[in-house]
Amino acid sequence: MNDPMVVKLDIANFTVHKVMIDSGSSADIIFKNVVDKMGLENARLEPVKTPLVGFGGSEMASVGMIKLPVSMGEEPKRKTLMVKFLVVDTPFAYNVTLGRPGLNLFRAVISTYHMKMKFPAENGIGEVASDHKKARPYEVEHMKPSDDYKTMELVPSEQGKTTRIGANMEDVEMAMIEFLRKNVDRFAWSPSDFTGINPEVIVHRLNVDPVARPVQQKKRSFGNDKNEIIRQEVDKLLKVGNVSEVQYTD
């Protein structure tokens, strides 16, 4: 199965389930209803002016930024660091999204094939395994037909409290597939699909001194492997008309 990497982390003295590991995200995100369930609804948030841009280019504004302690792994290979989260007030299928800033902070290495994440800790290499498959049966068992992404519940645990958001992942996947089908013409499947950018929007120019004397560089020699790669890339550019062949005399 190609399930997303979803783990369980301890955040601000809460055991938070359904933390999505997203190395494609440039921000660490926690959702406002989760923050409220933690009893931090009156916490002072740092203002953030830059909007978030999601899939499809849609923008959403964050409520602010909050810094929370995040713990990964089990003792003695446990690691705790302060992570800056953007607080977003919108329904979502997960409680938290841990993006590149948080992953880089923990120096974490992800294997989506093994559904595990490892990171250096003081006493060795810590490890976090995905708990997504464990979460799905729980959701199906406890959800009612009228439940949606806004449904939340606190589940007692030995380590403290667990914040959990109910969500029907099958509906999310079907909605994503339908979205991709409707917008299939918006994706570039080959270099020839790029129609270019209007020069009124942006133009790329080389910063070359017009009075400089042109100098011919010496021919560089490459190995067979590199020459084959270069040939393939040049053929692609020639095929779509991005470059053209020019003959120069010695």
Image: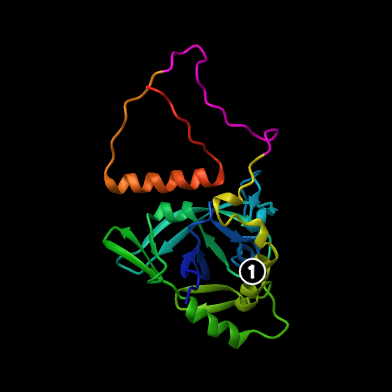
Query: Of 84 and 217, which appears nearest the observer?
Result: 217
Q: Which secondary structure, mark 1?
A: helix
Residue 93: quarter of image:
bottom right
Q: Residue furthest top?
A: 211
**Residue 150 image offset from top left, x and y in percent:** 69, 72
Is residue 37 in the magenta section? no
What span is in magenta?
198-214
Residue at image position (59%, 54%) is 188
Does residue 247 appear to the left or right of 45 in the view shown? left
- Residues 20 and 53: in front is 53
Instruction: Give the quarter of the image for residue 111.
Output: bottom left
Task: Give the crowd class for mark 1: few <14, some 14-19, many >=20 residues within 10 Å.
Answer: few
Percent across and percent down for residue 177 are 63, 70
Q: Is residue 152 above or below residue 194?
A: below
Which sits in the foreground, 206 or 6? 206
The picture places residue 25, in percent across and down from the top left corner, at 53, 55
Name the kind of residue labelled 1 in the image.
Answer: Met
Q: Does residue 35 lie above or below 238 as drawn?
A: below
Q: Is 163 displayed left or right of 118 in the figure? A: right
